[in-house]
Image (cartoon, helix red, strand yellow):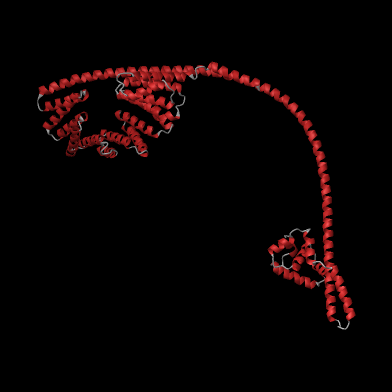
Amino acid sequence: MRKILLIALFIHCLIGEIFPQSTAMPTKGIENILSQSKEIALQPYFTDTILAKRIDSLTHATHSDQQFFEIIFQTGLSLCNTNHREEASKYLSYCLSVIKDIYPKIPQNSLVTYIHIMNQIGFVYNCMGLPDLAMNYYSKALDFSQENNCKEEEAILCNNIASILQAQKKYSESDSLFKKAIVINEEFKNPQKLFVNYNNLSVNYAKRENYTKALEYAFLAMHQLDAVNDSDMVILIQRNIGSIYLKQKETRLALQILKQVEKYQIKHHQEYYLAGTYQIMHNIYKAMDRKELAIEYLKKALALSEEHNNIMDKTTLLIELSDCYAKEKQYHTAFAMLKQSTVLKDSIYKIDEEKRTKSLSTAYNEERALQEKLIQIENVHDVTMQKIYIITACVIIILLLIAGWINYRLSKTKKKTKKTLYHYVQQKRGQMERQEEKIISLLNEQEKLKLELEQNERKQIYYSLQDTKNKEFIAQLTDRLKQLLLDMNPKEIQVKKQIRDIISQLNLLDSSNVLQDFRDSFESIHHHFYENLNEKYPNLTMKEMRLCALLRLGLSTKEIADITFKEVRSVESARNRLRKKLQIDQTEDLQKFLMSF
């Protein structure tokens, strides 16, 4: 046993030498992520002070997997909220590569957060104008959420993938994913998410000029909102509905809705959204051929876009104004605005190209770094597998040697045990034979005693019956002598005296109770017979109970008549009376019945 323990200790040390970094690697990766998170939290643009404190506390204390994943997600979210998308993409890509290295299987309590991290990086790439990369991460996250039955996250990802497909004008595929998200969100009764799904479906149908369906889903989206708490969103969906009515050429209804929207947005100082409202109102007045009002609302929209430095909207509005002035034959103003829009368009194109190039370069570098990291992990895995094969071979050889040695020891022990067992069996067999002889002797003696007991019982019954018979005879003889005295002539005094003397002598011979003596003698052999019989049939007389006892002994009617000095008919009558008292049918055996007591 000591040798086996030493061998096991040797194997354990060997594995420890080959895999010395197995526990250190995950710890190092986590420390690197926390360190990078801390650096981001120290940047001036990072405004989430509570998260910064949490990151700082986790770098100096132990933490759970759930806390670690939550820090990654919250840090990425803060970067997105402050429009630092490139930093977010770099940070999240690095974190995902480390997570793959550390966790072969994502912990159960961190599944949802891990899905949110993948969804987040997909969102970042989509905002950077890289929908293919975004789709890649969304698809991976969707597969992962389906594998782990994370339904709410599955709905979010279906909506996000459908939005990309919508932008790519793949409306049928987009529809099916939006509807799938709706089914899940209806199951979980999530009105905010249902609003997004229905609104997106409304946009889908509007782009295909199916305005009836677009309105249906727009109203369903509005139905999910609370009129008080979600008033801003209600106004925006009303604006969308007004825009759809405009496309249906229901200009009056569209104008009525848009005026309500304009009034609300002015009251609540929502200038950013108001610019879009003015643009739609321009289109309404344009459709109604009210040129002055159309130009007025276009100018209002342009003023707001300049105020908020919205170059994209400003370019579009300048082109629209240029067209309006051209139709009014104000060519100089139209040309100036068109020229201004062209300059802005060129600058937008240049900025977009720079951003796109930078985004592509960043994405390429991140993907290359990720691929290099994966190759590195695979190389480490290959080396590890080679070491595992070597260890496995060594362990198998050692185990075979141990098995051979154990087999030899077992064989030797088996022979010794077999020999000891043979002697033990022989010894026990001799003891058993002697015990068997004793048992046979005791059984024979017991049988002999049983026979003697039965003989004694038969003798006792015989003597008891004989005694009963004698006492019955004396009783009958006494009764006859008494009758004789009564029948004699009173003058025969001497004879009467002699008869009385004989009766006195007979009474001396039979001074005991015949019935009680018979009962005592009978119950010494058949215990509690009288007691059991009396308990069930308390109305039986002592003579009837004696008759039962005689029948229990198996005596015939004639034998009972001889013992009791009665006629056979008298005994048969007594038996019939007994049957009635015992309530036994004539077909039933009386003796067998009495054997049960």
Quadrant where the N terminus is found in the figure: top right
| Residue 89, placed above or below residue 436 | above
Q: What residue is drawn where x is 15% and y is 34%?
A: 285
At horizontal 77% and vertical 66% (from top left) the residue drawn is 546
Q: Looking at the image, which residue is at 75% across and 72% down?
A: 573
Q: Residue at x 21, y 23 (%)?
A: 311
In this view, the residue in front, 463 or 515, is: 515
Q: Position of residue 433 (x, y in %)?
A: 81, 39
Q: Nearer the viewer, residue 586 or 502?
A: 502
Can residue 475 be seen in the rendering of this structure?
yes
The answer to which quarter of the image holds residue 107 is: top left
- Whether residue 244 sits left or right of residue 383 in the image: it is left
Residue 425: x and y, percent?
Answer: 78, 33
How far from the left and from the top, in percent, is residue 206? 26, 34
Residues 155 and 461: in front is 461
Q: Foreground residue, 373 or 588? A: 588
Q: Is residue 589 above or below residue 196?
A: below
Determine the image quadrant of residue 57.
top left
